[in-house]
Amino acid sequence: MPLLDANGPIPETWVKLAEGQAAPKGEKVILEEARLREEGAPRGVSALGVIVGPDADARRMADLLPTLSLVAVRFPSFADGRGFSIARRLRGLGFRGEIRAVGPVIADQFPMLLAVGVDTVEIPEAMAARQPEPQWRDAKEAVSLSYQSGLTRGAVSIFEARRAARGEARGPRADKAAPETPEQMAARLNAKYAGATAQEVLRAGIEKEFRGGISMVSSFGAESAALLHMVSQIDKATPVLFLETGMLFPATLAYQQELAEHLGLTGVRLVRPDHAQVKGEDPDGDLHKDYADSCCDLRKTRPLERALAPFQAWITGRKRFQTADRADLQLFEADANGRIKLNPMAEWDAARISEYMDAHSLPRHPMVSEGFPSLGCAPCTTKVKPGEDPRAGRWRGSDKTECGIHIVDGRVVRGAPQAA
């Protein structure tokens, strides 16, 4: 089928895998999303693409986007506009790869496809026969001005054209305020939501401040059920990133499935370390014995950073009472990568969490009753004796208190690191 971009016809360089077809080594391949999720990424390919239907939820693809170079979106007919929304949402999530429209779209829709972030259009032969390439080029060139520039390639908004006609410089006015930094945003949100409840902070983050661009990171540990329940009451499809390090207690893995099902959470994504990196850096699975920080970096910090790439903000379950480093925890923080972290339960204590879980009949992690009030990876978590700090069993015998996902350059992040 003919393939067009904004400049005209282009050669096809991708291989679309048929059902059951093996991926050719060294090629760029496209496969169905369902197959990718079931089988994982094929080995030995030079680039990976996925094809999705018109009912795809871009938010639920957030875990895949860092691994993809192309997303092809099916258009069942030119009258079905859902693909436009999918493309625009993918760009909103930070996807910078190729977006391809596949199906019987028409030439008159070409400018709008480009405007929402589509790069290429794959047209059925029958449609191409009725609307040859010059007709597509003419349709694109017919729109040189627009009220909303959106993501359009080369289009000039009417307002920019008017400024140019008056001899004014294009772009932002000189007196326009500079873009808000993450630190400024965090400070503004802390002031705006001062005194708000955990549920109010969550709802503001999910439905208003970061709509479509926020995820939650959860360990599905001893206290996780409370915050997960709050999220489920707002939007059960909220992306929830679960770091499956390969070293968790079997009881934690079972609890994760039980709790997600109990709450009806549909956006849980298992985030695993890179297989090749684990094989190269921890082939025997004993890196934690002498280099706990390196193990956490390999199995938690790096995988999480990849998973967070499409998001503007993320929700954590940290509380001030947990460690000295968290004593001044704010509701909103800027992390080292320019994202905003929400800590809705910052001021909650253990008793309040327990009361909430009882009030909502939430299932408990089975190991809590066995003497594990704080849970991490199995090799680095031990039972806590009566009277000990609840986190005393984490990395026992060392001065390590954090796994690393909230630490940059050896310190707990309160904002982006300062320049040296």
Image: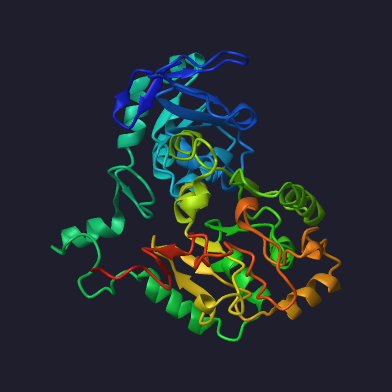
Front residue (pair 362, 412): 412
Q: What is the image's colouring?
A: rainbow
Residue 378's x, y, as percent? 65, 52
Residue 173's x, y, as percent? 23, 69
At 62% from the left edge and 14% from the top edge, which residue is drawn?
A: 20
Residue 315 image-quadrant placement: bottom right
Front residue (pair 229, 80): 229
Residue 112's x, y, as percent? 43, 41
Left or right of residue 353: residue 176: left
Identity of the residue furthest to the bottom in this view? 195
Residue 93 seen in this snapshot = no
At 65% from the left edge and 49% from the top edge, which residue is drawn?
A: 248
Front residue (pair 349, 141): 349
Residue 32 image-quadrant placement: top right
User: In the rendered image of this protein, does residue 72 appear above or below residue 237?
Assistant: above
At 29% from the left edge and 74% from the top edge, which residue is drawn?
A: 177
Front residue (pair 208, 251): 251
Residue 377's x, y, as percent? 62, 53
Residue 348 seen in this snapshot = yes
